[in-house]
Image (tube, rainbow, N blue to C red):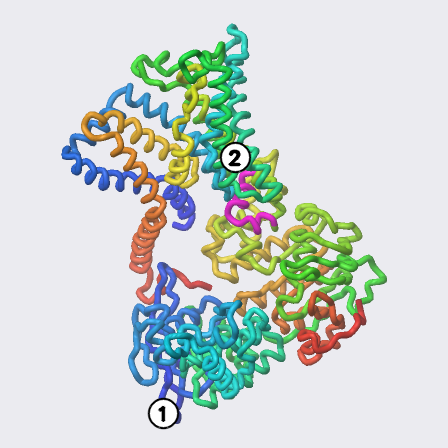
């Protein structure tokens, strides 16, 4: 462990934020232990670490949402240890959360001023609100028109409104929690421009993230957290992604994008062999739109990974739900190993050879109150049953095998899945879905909320399955993940496949315009 | 410590709520009794001696607990599937009525074992049929089971009242004629000490039903799927479970268990169906399930608890108004609902604090306690 947490060489005089020796415990979990962070005024500072490393806890303490058990917190040179959210906001510390907290039925201006409405003669002065918000928008470069309803905004625009909100409240220290999770590459680039501009106007920015390319792209300094402690502090321009990853995980991590193409149907030449999974003209109704998936066709050969890139909410969820049997298909057909499963039940699909890593493990993929062992048979409970009674010996044996093979920790399978960390919960899902007999795998966001070490492991497992001749449909919000794993890549926009290309032809620059709908082309290789 | 953790949690689940309920009853009861001008110790002594202090009292408690356990188990099974069956009252009545009708229809000389089996089956079918109504409406049309079960209660109770009052009653009463066959012997027939109490061998039947339901819930695939639906319907659906089918199954099963409770009064006590015999036991079943934390074992303990209160209320009637006990029941329900999660959290904290202290005392002083979060 590197004890390099002392202040930087110090030609910036005033620290905007200084937290020293912060401890915070939740029950048996020590979320922060002696954490130190020092952020200079007017810098963009990255707070990086794996899931569960204690980043969010530390920032919640800074923003007054939590009180520390021990330690000292200073903002702008003044000690503020244990202050409240109201005090934090009054002192200019503003937090932009991962999940937006906006009122969709109000306009942008109304949302921005909410709680601090300009008033004239005791009533809300709407004109002044619009004027002030427009002025702030122009100054900061956070361009969004003040009269529009928040419900009509894109995700990127909504995020700008969130940042405007904190700036309107006079934030001089801006905390951003994983701000790019929901953005497309061009929107990310815009966000960086804005953040640099806001910084140059004197605002200090702390960026909580686990994406190393973001850290490299936009930050000045980095504080790395591991297991509740701040283990290293570095200058961004003096380090490398590998260096940061090593500090996060505590060992070397392979970050290379491996282009080990599968032995199967690259170049889309499915013709030779029967495709493992084939979809023809699939149309699916969405919650709000008539055609969330609109006439989508593709085929995946055995031993091939087809990756779907796209900004979230363009029909990926509905597509996978329909393939998995969780949503009714309104048109088209689905063939698994040549067998029509368009109208089969979930269980029939499983028995026919469909495996599914769902995008939301807390919602669909796991029953949190059930034990690890019970979760490891979910969806296959009929295979562990004899005359209606669950064969507990086989369930236990299966759990022991999987826990060992997939390194699920802690290794006691009788523990409720709820008590596991996010990475280990996902390993339970992966173990279950990869150990069953299957022809095709639907993998939705397989590494979401999973730490760097586990991501590596999960990627290896997916490659192994591909090399064993399985067909994999991969959906991920992480473009890098799609690029890393896929043999072919399709871009989904507005419920359609707007482009399909071989991995060799794809890059962030090529895919970006398709993801935003700026470019469309017919499928070249499907 | 980790292997015993899940077992300890299960035990806590079953035992803690009744203990909390008991503590609340003692504290609030003291205040209420003092308000009536009596000495709490005298009243509690009378309550205990009137229930667990003699064989008659024990018999009465067991008798009442039998019906309550059925009602509580019925509600618990529905809640395990994520549904709230408020209809146990009507299902209990329907079950009792079914048993009585079959008992009336059978010839007088029918062998006891056959008659009891048929009448019990009728009780189960009667309750199950009433439970099927909200089940079908929920599974097919998404109608909310709380609304439907409340409404079905009105319909069933009014319908049975009409049938008994207009077609089937013994003159000057609101009960049917006595059954020709199918009555269950009293415990007093074998153990004379129980003489005079309504306790009867239905208790064995219900005990077996409780064991069977526990086995069903925790050992069978159907139970695995039922609980999965109750905890996370979307995850159950993902796991290949047909959720509406489980809803229907759970509500039919719940109704059938409540119907079985009708056996206790009709076949074990009176030998006929009497209008209004359920007397709120079906509704009290909600409290039993709540205090019993939807666990079959907890339901048994909670049923005994409420039966003791109910019988004890009669025992202390001379000293304090009987309503004191009813107030206590109400307070227990409210307080248990609100306090049990909180009490459990405190217990956890105390236990984990002790565990951490012990492990860090044993380990090197610098070792991080509580493990990492990965």
**Residue lying farthest to the bottom in this orientation:** A11
Percent of width and height locating residue B360: 32, 60
Instruction: Identify the residue at horizontal 46%, vertical 32% (top origin).
Output: B88
Task: Determine which quarter of the picture holds residue A492.
Answer: bottom right
- Give the number of the disc on residue B164: none
Q: Which residues are magenta?
A: B220-237
Left or right: residue B355 versus residue B179 is left
Residue bearing the label numbered 2 = B216
Image quadrant occupied by the N terminus of chain A: bottom left
Task: For residue B156, say whether it is visible.
Answer: yes
Do tags 2 and 1 sit on the same chain?
Answer: no
Q: Considering the numbered disc 2 on the image, is that residue within a helix, a strand or a loop?
A: helix
Instruction: Identify the residue at horizontal 53%, vertical 36% (top origin).
Output: B251
Dominant SS type (magenta): helix
Residues at marks 2 and 1, CA–CA distance in whole angstroms: 70 Å
**Chain at tag 1:** A
Percent of width and height locating residue B83: 50, 42
Using the image, determine if residue B158 lies above or below residue A40: above
**Chain at tag 2:** B
Q: Considering the numbered disc 1 on the image, is that residue within a helix, a strand or a loop?
A: loop
Q: Is residue B227 magenta?
A: yes
Using the image, determine if residue B312 lies above or below residue B138: above
Q: Is residue A143 magenta?
A: no
**Residue lying farthest to the front in this orientation:** A121
Percent of width and height locating residue B179: 47, 12
Percent of width and height locating residue B166: 49, 17
Task: Determine which quarter of the picture holds residue A253.
Answer: bottom right
Left or right: residue B56 versus residue A228 is left
Using the image, determine if residue B191 lies above or below residue A63: above
**Residue lying farthest to the top in this orientation:** B109
- Give the number of the disc on residue A13: 1
Left or right: residue B138 versus residue B184 is right
């Amino acid at each position: 462990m590197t004890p390099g947490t002392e202040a930087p060489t110090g030609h910036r005089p005033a620290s905007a934020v200084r937290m020293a020796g912060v401890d915070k415990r939740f029950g048996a979990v020590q979320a922060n232990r002696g954490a130190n962070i020092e952020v200079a005024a007017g810098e963009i500072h990255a707070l990086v670490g794996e899931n569960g490393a204690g980043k969010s806890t530390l920032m919640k303490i800074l923003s007054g949402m939590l009180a520390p058990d021990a330690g000292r917190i200073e903002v702008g040179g003044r000690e503020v240890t244990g202050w409240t959210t109201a005090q934090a906001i009054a002192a200019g510390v503003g937090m932009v959360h991962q999940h937006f907290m906006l009122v969709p039925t109000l306009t942008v201006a109304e949302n921005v001023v909410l709680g601090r409405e300009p008033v004239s003669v005791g009533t809300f002065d709407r004109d002044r609100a619009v004027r002030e918000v427009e002025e702030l928008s122009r100054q900061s470069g956070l361009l969004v028109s003040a009269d529009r309803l928040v419900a009509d905004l894109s995700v990127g625009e909504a995020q700008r409104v969130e940042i405007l909100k904190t700036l309107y409240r006079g934030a001089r220290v801006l905390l951003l929690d994983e701000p790019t999770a929901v953005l497309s590459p061009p929107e990310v680039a815009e966000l960086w421009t804005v953040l640099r501009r806001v910084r140059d106007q004197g605002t200090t920015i702390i960026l909580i993230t686990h994406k190393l390319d973001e850290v490299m792209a936009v930050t000045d300094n980095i504080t790395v957290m591991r297991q509740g402690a701040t283990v290293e502090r570095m200058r961004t321009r003096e380090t490398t992604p590998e260096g940061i990853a090593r500090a996060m995980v505590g060992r070397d991590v392979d970050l290379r994008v491996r282009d080990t193409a599968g032995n199967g149907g690259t170049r889309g030449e499915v013709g030779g062999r029967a495709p493992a999974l084939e979809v023809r003209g699939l149309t699916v109704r969405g919650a709000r739109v008539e055609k969330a998936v609109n006439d989508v066709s593709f085929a995946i050969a055995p031993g091939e990974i087809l990756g779907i890139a796209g900004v979230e909410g363009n029909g990926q969820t509905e597509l996978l739900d329909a393939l998995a049997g969780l949503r009714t298909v309104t048109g088209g057909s689905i063939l698994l190993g040549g067998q029509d499963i368009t109208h089969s039940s979930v269980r029939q699909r499983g028995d026919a050879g469909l495996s599914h890593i769902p995008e939301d493990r807390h919602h669909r993929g796991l029953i949190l109150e059930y034990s690890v062992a019970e979760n490891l048979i979910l969806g296959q409970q009929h295979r562990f049953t004899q005359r209606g009674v669950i064969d507990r010996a086989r369930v236990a044996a299966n759990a022991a095998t999987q826990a060992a093979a997939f390194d699920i920790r802690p290794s006691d399978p009788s523990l409720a899945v709820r008590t596991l960390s996010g990475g280990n919960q996902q390993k339970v899902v992966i173990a279950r879905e990869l150990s069953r007999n299957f022809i095709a795998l639907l993998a939705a966001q397989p590494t979401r909320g999973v730490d760097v070490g586990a991501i590596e492991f999960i990627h290896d497992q997916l490659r192994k399955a591909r090399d064993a001749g399985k067909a994999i449909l991969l959906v991920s919000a992480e473009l890098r993940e799609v690029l890393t794993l896929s043999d072919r890549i399709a871009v989904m926009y507005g419920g359609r496949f707007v482009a399909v290309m071989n991995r060799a032809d794809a890059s962030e620059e090529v895919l970006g315009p398709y993801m935003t709908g700026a470019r469309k082309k017919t499928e070249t290789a499907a | 410590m980790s292997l015993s953790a899940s077992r300890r949690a299960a035990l806590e689940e079953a035992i803690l709520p009744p203990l909390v309920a008991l503590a609340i009853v003692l504290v609030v009861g003291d205040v209420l009794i003092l308000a009536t001008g009596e000495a709490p110790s005298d009243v509690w002594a009378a309550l205990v001696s009137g229930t667990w202090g003699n064989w008659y009292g024990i018999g009465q408690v067991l008798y009442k607990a039998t019906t309550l356990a059925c009602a509580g188990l019925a509600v618990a099974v529905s809640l395990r599937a994520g549904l709230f069956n408020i209809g146990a009252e009507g299902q209990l009545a329907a079950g009792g009525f079914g048993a009585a009708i079959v008992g009336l229809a059978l010839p007088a000389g029918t062998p006891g074992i056959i008659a009891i089996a048929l009448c019990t089956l009728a009780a189960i079918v009667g309750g199950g049929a009433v439970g099927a109504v909200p089940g079908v409406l929920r599974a097919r049309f998404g109608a909310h089971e709380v609304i439907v079960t409340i409404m079905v209660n009105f319909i069933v109770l009014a319908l049975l009242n009409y049938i008994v009052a207009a077609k089937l009653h013994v003159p000057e009463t609101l009960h049917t004629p006595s059954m020709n066959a199918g009555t269950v012997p009293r415990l007093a027939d074998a153990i004379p000490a129980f003489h005079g109490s309504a306790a009867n061998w239905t208790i064995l039947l219900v005990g077996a039903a409780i064991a069977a339901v526990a086995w069903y819930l925790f050992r069978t695939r159907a139970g695995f799927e039922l609980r999965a639906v109750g905890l996370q319907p979307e995850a159950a659906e993902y796991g290949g479970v047909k959720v509406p089918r489980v809803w229907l199954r759970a509500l039919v099963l719940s109704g059938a268990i409540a119907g079985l409770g009708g056996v206790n009064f009709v076949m074990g006590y009176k030998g006929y169906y009497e209008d209004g015999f359920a007397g709120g036991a079906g509704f009290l079943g909600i409290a039993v399930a709540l205090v019993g934390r939807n666990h079959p074992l907890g339901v048994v303990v909670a049923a005994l608890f409420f039966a003791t209160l109910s019988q004890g209320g009669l025992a202390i009637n001379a000293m304090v108004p009987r309503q004191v006990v009813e107030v206590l029941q109400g307070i227990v329900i409210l307080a248990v609902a609100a306090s049990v999660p909180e009490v459990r959290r405190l217990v956890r904290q105390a236990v984990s604090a002790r565990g951490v202290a012990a492990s860090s005392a044993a380990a090197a002083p610098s070792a991080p306690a509580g493990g990492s979060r990965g």
